[in-house]
Image (spheres, coloured by chain):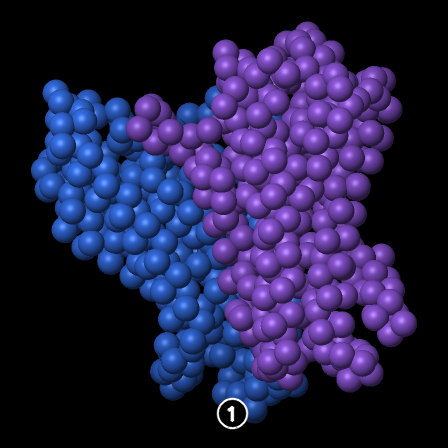
Amino acid sequence: MYKMLSVEYRKMISGRTLLVSISLGVLISIINVIENQSFVTWFLEGAMIGTSFSTINLYVRWIGVDQLTLGSSIFFFIFPLLAAIPYSWSYLSEKQQGYTNHILVRAKQKNYFVAKYIMVFFSGTIAVVIPIIINFALNALVCPNSTPHVLNLLTPIGQGSFFSKVFYQQPLLYCVAACFLYAFWGGVCAVVALTVSLFVKKPLFAMMSPFVFAVGGDFLRQLLVTPTSTTKFETSPLALIRATSYNMNPAWYLISIILGLILATFSIVYLKGSKNEIL
Amino acid sequence: MKFFRTIRYDLIRGILKRPHFLLMPIISVMLCLRCSYILNLNEVAGSWLDYVMFCFKGMKPYNSITVEEGFMVPLLWIVLLGAMLYTSLEYPFKDAGTIGQQVILRSDKRIYWWLSKCIWNLLTIFACFLLIYSSVAAFCIANGVPMIFENFYEATNVIFSEVNDSFADSVILSRTTTAVLVTIIMPIISTMAISMFQMLLGLFMKQIYSFVISMAVLIISAYSTFPLALGNYSMVIRNEHILESGMKNVVGFILSTIGILLSIAFGSAAFTSFDIFQDKKNC
């Protein structure tokens, strides 16, 4: 098992797609930094006299919380794609090339799929978290560091939001928690693509599947919304990926959804993968 | 002669034999149901043109300084355009990696293959729009909605309620030429330009990346009214005939045409050195 993990890790980390995905994410997150830089300059030149610094606060403007900038909008819209691009296609590609046959005569089929699942999850995690961490570091160069004000209307973190108390008391700790949340969502998006790849023949379709599920889910939700259909908790898949949301998204709610998805995808990959007659 | 045979082959294999086009009627009927629900809720009647305008509505111009809420991606519009871009994404390069190699070998010039794919791309987008208009028409006929090329002010007022305080004087598209321009020509030509750009990018990178970039172009268009963000011209709500100080149709038409021509020209130059035997394992 350890050997299999090590082989999968080397394949994943040396692939060009991981590097491209991270670069794409970093490039988009830099758009957010540039926008923040111009906003902070505009603010400091006296454009908003009388407003507190919490509008240009680092913890409010970094990509993990901000919902106003173009960079943040693009990043979270293509988040499922960024997570799925690095390595989720690998199973299908290896199967089509016959590489899987060579592996399976030397190792257990179950071990192969477990190792594949872990590394695909890990690839999704690092593909989204590295750009977010770089964005935080770059924003720290341009935005002032102060505690966010609870009355700031630009911050969509209220009672019932993910770690809302922590955000207003220890914002740095909140950022760490948000990074973990994004890491898990990245991993989930990647393993959803891996799960779909067990059922389809096109790697492109498998890679796009988490994006299609998220956007399609949101599309249906917007079509079905009525003036009386209000929900207590956030139901939009694209909004759930974010740590901040206009509806309630408490930590236990997000963690249960993530754990549910991990459990469901792992069961499918393990059962379907170990039963498939590949050789 | 060989060029026309290549085009005919692309039209049969790339349009008639692909199930991707089924997405268009499904999405447009869903949008029509939503439009019908909104109009019924407000007790107003709409026409075929109102339903088409709802499908390509988009979102009002966004200003990050004055807003009280964050930027919301106009999902209904993006899904419709995204489905069209997905339809035109895969075929050319899948073809180049398989049977298209035989076509290139047997055609007189390598460039014929690229030009044929450009025509295929433009016709694919046109076919997508045709399917959307036909599906909306079928929905309207089934529900007794008048099939006229004119919008009703009450319905327009409800559909574009977020901008009804800044409507342009010509918001009633009674003149057929204006209606055709706003709901047919501008959305089609701007989407064709984005789709051609996506296909051009496919020569230099994997299709998934070119799709990511096209999605980014759509979000930039929703976020900013910068004239080069071509998606703006496919949003009916931002058209100069709907919104005062809206996007200029002439500018949009010229920029989209230039975009299409540049994509064809750059693609022709790049395709002469494009490796058709490249490794396609990661799609």
Residue tagged 1: A106
Q: Chain of mark 1?
A: A
Residue B217: x and y in percent read 50, 48
- Chain appearing in blue on the rendered image: A
Viewer-closest of B270 and A261: B270
Q: Amino acid at mark 1?
A: Arg
Q: On the picture, is B95 further left or further right than A245?
A: right
- When the figure is inspected, residue B54 is found, relative to residue A257, above or below; the finding is above
What is the x, y in percent for residue A228? 53, 16
From the viewer's side, name the closer residue of B5 and B98.
B5
Q: Measuring 78% from the left and 84% from the top, which residue is drawn there? A: B105
**Measured from the top left, where is residue A125 in percent x and y?**
36, 61
The residue depicted at 13 percent of the width and 22 percent of the height is A49
Which residue is more in the foreground, A143 or A217? A143
Instruction: Chain letter for purple, please.
Output: B
Q: Residue at x 56, y 91 (%)?
A: A102
Q: Is residue B217 above or below residue B200?
A: above
Q: Classify mark 1: residues with Cα within 10 Å, few (<14), some (14-19) or many (20+).
A: few
- Image quarter (top left, top right, bottom left or bottom right) of the N terminus of chain B: bottom right
Q: Secondary structure at mark 1?
A: loop
Q: Quadrant of the C terminus of chain B?
A: bottom right
The answer to whether residue A30 is visible is yes
Circle count: 1
Q: Quadrant of residue B55?
A: top right
**Horizontal placement of A146 versus A5: left or right?**
left
Which residue occupies 54% across, 61% down? B210
Q: Nearer the viewer, residue A216 or A188?
A: A216
Q: Work out whether B52 lies above or below B107.
A: above
Residue B65's spot in the image, x, y percent? 31, 28
